[in-house]
Image (cartoon, rainbow, N blue to C red):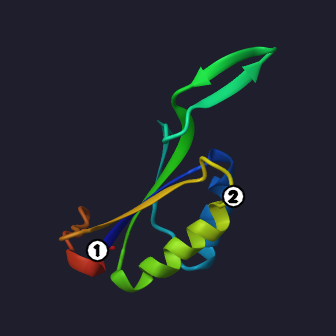
Amino acid sequence: MKQIEAVIRPHKLDAVREALIDNGITGMTIEEVRGSGGKKVIRRCTGIRISCHFMPKIKLVMVVVDSLVDRIVSTITQTAKTGTIGDGKIFITPVEEVVRVRTEESGECAL
């Protein structure tokens, strides 16, 4: 099993979520986060330059079976991509165990 964390632009959330649902992925956690990358972002507000160190982002977190990882990553990248700096990142990490609290099931059947 793998945990996929995707940090994307807020305005892409609905499209990404719908694309994941269309691919059979319904279990996910969504958080509003702030982040910064390697490039300094300057915005203009009424003619005044404002440095924005942390931009609003959305973080999607899901744990899936290994066989779905490539399809999910492809779906997220194709749907969230604008082609400009700040599109986001996807992190994939191994998950040793999952336990469903309600039934105490564990492993892949707990997903």
Camera-near label (2 vs 1) is: 2
- Asked if residue 68 is positioned above or below residue 15 in the image, the reply reads below
Q: Mark 1 belongs to which amino acid?
A: Ala
| Furthest residue in direction bottom, as rendered | 67
Q: Quadrant of the C terminus?
A: bottom left
Query: What label sits on residue 85 in the rendered view?
Result: none
Q: Check disc 2 and report the residue beneath it.
A: 83
Q: Secondary structure at mark 1?
A: helix
- Residue pictured at 76% horizontal, 18% vertical: 45
Q: Residue at x 35, y 80 (%)?
A: 65
Q: Is residue 66 above or below residue 40?
A: below
Instruction: Residue 67: name its quadrant.
Output: bottom left
Task: Out of 84 and 106, give the one closest to the viewer.
Answer: 84
Residue sitting at x 69%, y 58%: 83
Residue 25 in sight from this viewpoint: no
Sort mark 2 into few (<14), some (14-19) or many (20+) by Cα contacts within 10 Å: few
Query: In the orientation shown, which residue stands out farthest toward the right?
Result: 46
Tell me if 83 is positioned left or right of 90 in this view.
Answer: right
How many angstroms separate mark 2 from mark 1 (CA)? 36 Å
Provide residue 99's location: percent of width, then percent of height. Answer: 21, 67
List x then y, in percent, for residue 11.
69, 48
Mark 2 and mark 1 lie on one chain; the one further toward the N terminus is 2
Q: Up-down: is 16 above or below 111?
A: above
Label 2 SS: loop
Task: Give amino acid for label 2.
Answer: Gly
Q: Is residue 22 visible?
A: yes
The numbered disc on residue 110 is: 1
